[in-house]
Image: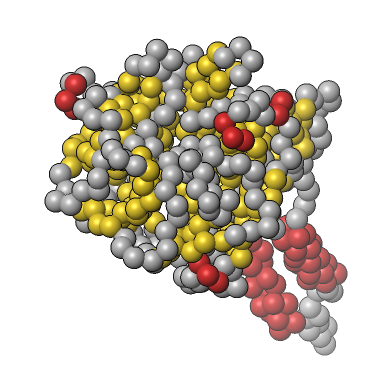
Amino acid sequence: MFPSERRAISVLVPILVVVLVALANPVSGRNLERSAPAATHPTASASGSPASLSLSWSELSIPAAASPPPRIDGSMVWDSTDGYGLLFGGEYLNETTYHTVYYNDTWTYLGGHWTNVTSAHAPSERSGTSLTDDPADHEVVLFGGVNSHGRDLNDTWVWSAGTWTNVTPTGASESPPAGFWASMTYDAATSSVLLFGGINESSQYGNDTWSFKAGKWTQLFPTSLPPGRHAQEMVYDAASSEVVMFGGLGSTNYLNDTWTYRSGNWAPILGGNHPGSRVGPGIVYDTDESVVVLYGGQPAPDDYYSTWLFSGGVWAQYNLSANPPNPTNPWGQMIYDPTDHYVFLFYEEGGSGPTMETWALTISSSGPSPIQASLAADPDSISLGQGTTFVTEATGGTGTYRYAYSTLPPGCASANASSLSCTPTRTGTFVIGVNVTDTGTGHAASTTTVTVTQSTTTPPPSSNSSSSSGSPISGWEWIVLVAVLLVAALLGVVLYRRRRRPPAVTAVPSPPS
């Protein structure tokens, strides 16, 4: 072998090895996975004091035909597991016929849209029921109320994934006494639901305390108790890790005292300015600004047009220029909507109807933004049989995010992921929601829509899918192909030169002399 051939082969062999490795382990641009840097989530700082916040009420333009029928004393809560507002029951007095209607319908509120999700299997018609979110058991809990015959109820139901389930204990002593106008909220400090007072079989002004956890009711016996009452409201204050309860009607008068529940005991908030005495105000917790919000109620004291915030054991009063009119009947129909970051108020003005008022209260501060979420569908318009991907972008908060999708079209199932791909199996326009939580107390939600139409033609295969004619050649495959051709060409040159080389000349012997 000549030196030139050895040099050519010494060059060709490494190239051939690289090509063979590439052919054995093809890497295409479509399948290349790059490790993304670890996401960092800045810790959300605490919001300012109530006095440093800016408040603004605005009326929402939701047509009456697209809203639940008028009512008072319904129960509404934000379902943090399914990611929407949930309204159940209530009553309506027709002042023309003087006939009172009791409801057992169920509605969801998401992204400015109401949806009637009433089913045959549901709690019976009633008003004054207690309703609260239970994120520990991933459900909404309903207890008691009073029906159209004036009968007090003590059944327990849970709502999860669009379905009501009766979980009433079999023994009469295993539930709180039948009654209505009690107050109930989720106590995150104990990961259980807390219920207090109300009108019940034992007293018109109850002061018993109960907890509900993992399907079981347990009566609690705190050493300190608020005076008995009904029609008070309470909510969990995550910033202070305690339950806050306000007002109600006691045995002698309307009340305006504030109590907190922490470490198994009740304690009053003494001193300072308090809202006026009342029953049935709207009270919620703003998870973005970490404050308790109170508005309206009866018997309409001088400050019932004021908006009150509670934080750090102190009430702050806001007298705004624009307010929801005659807010005497919130009666539990007020929630905090983390999707649009506002307090949502749905009530009957003055209790006389026949139309409902729908208002939003936005609260903002100059502090850093809390956890935020944005949901988009890609693509957002598809034909039946095609797939789409729901992508959630979240910022802020503390630690790792957890994702829960709701109101997905048939064929799609929720998953704890920022990206969710699926193929809907039914046509229509769907409003999809995502609920994002972090390892702290951060919470955010967002919505998007996707339209699925009936396919009239077979959609062409996407650039990412294989077909009978083969997949498009990627950049890496072009490199491998060129390398193979180059090696083949170089080998051909070497072989050609070797074939064309003349035979070696040997010495011709001299003829004999």
Position in image of residue 447 (x %, y %): 64, 45
Position in image of residue 73 (x %, y %): 48, 30
Position in image of residue 74 (x %, y %): 49, 30
144 or 465: nearer the viewer: 144
Q: Is residue 309 visible?
A: yes
Relative horizontal placement of residue 264, taking residue 86 as reference (left or right): left
Answer above or below: position of 450 versus 246: above
- Image point (55%, 13%), residue name: 99
Answer above or below: position of 324 versus 13: above
Answer above or below: position of 286 versus 427: below
- Image point (35%, 54%), residue name: 258
Position in image of residue 381 (x %, y %): 77, 37
Answer above or below: position of 29 versus 126: below
Quarter-of-image position of residue 203:
top left
Q: Is residue 40 visible?
A: no
187 or 487: nearer the viewer: 187
Relative horizontal placement of residue 490, taking residue 95 as reference (left or right): right
